[in-house]
Amino acid sequence: NEEIRIQACKTMHVYARGCGTLLPSSLGVDWNDPDYTAYTAAFYKVFVYYCVHHHFESGRLLNGVESMRHIPGIIVQGRHDVVSPPLMAHRLHKAWPEAEYVIVPDASHSSMEPSLAAALIRATEQFKDLR
């Protein structure tokens, strides 16, 4: 039922915004915008798929870090992230010291937060000329 699915996505979105942002009110939500609603529904469809298939298991990335240590990387972490706490990023950096480690002091988890978005853009800009 599409209506029930959309309502479930909205409910999850409101909950996630409360957990994933430092200042939830700073991120606009427009449920009257069909593109925003479609994006949100698609996002949570993928999120649920990853949850069901255990892709967010604790330690999953750390267990495979040896296979990627030769790849240049930047770990970008919001200092106030309660979804993926900074301790996890710290452990990843200890296991992958070749990666740059950036802590964004005024951010939480959401890449929609302005300071975290800026840090992610700066990080990706460093790789745009790699071949």
Image: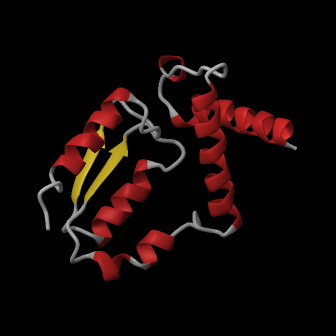
Residue 52, percent across and down?
71, 64
**Looking at the picture, how far across and down is residue 39, in whole percent?**
58, 38
Q: Nearer the viewer, residue 50 or 129?
A: 129
State how the image is colored: secondary structure
Quadrant assignment, res 62: bottom left
Q: Is residue 25 left or right of residue 74?
A: right
Vertically, is 110 above or below 131?
Answer: above
Residue at 21%, 77% (x, y): give it: 70
Q: Is residue 105 visible?
A: no
Q: Position of residue 91 (x, y in %)?
A: 37, 63
Q: Is residue 26 left or right of residue 48?
A: left
Furthest residue to the front?
Answer: 34
Judge by depth and name the residue closer to the eye, 121 or 38.
Answer: 38
Residue 25 in view here? yes
- Residue drawn at point x = 33 percent, y = 82 percent: 67
Question: Eyeballing the image, is 68 above or below 98?
Answer: below
What is the quadrant of residue 34 in the picture?
top right
Q: Is residue 104 left or right of residue 125?
A: right
**Count of marks placed on residues:** 0
Location of the N terminus by quadrant is: top right
User: Vertical placement of 41 versus 97: above or below?
Assistant: above
Identify which residue, 41 or 122, lies in the foreground. Answer: 41
Q: Farthest bottom residue?
A: 67
Question: Residue at 31% of width from left, 30% of height from top?
Answer: 115
Q: Position of residue 110 (x, y in %)?
A: 46, 38
Where is 66 relative to 15, above or below? below
* Left or right: 66 in relation to 6: left
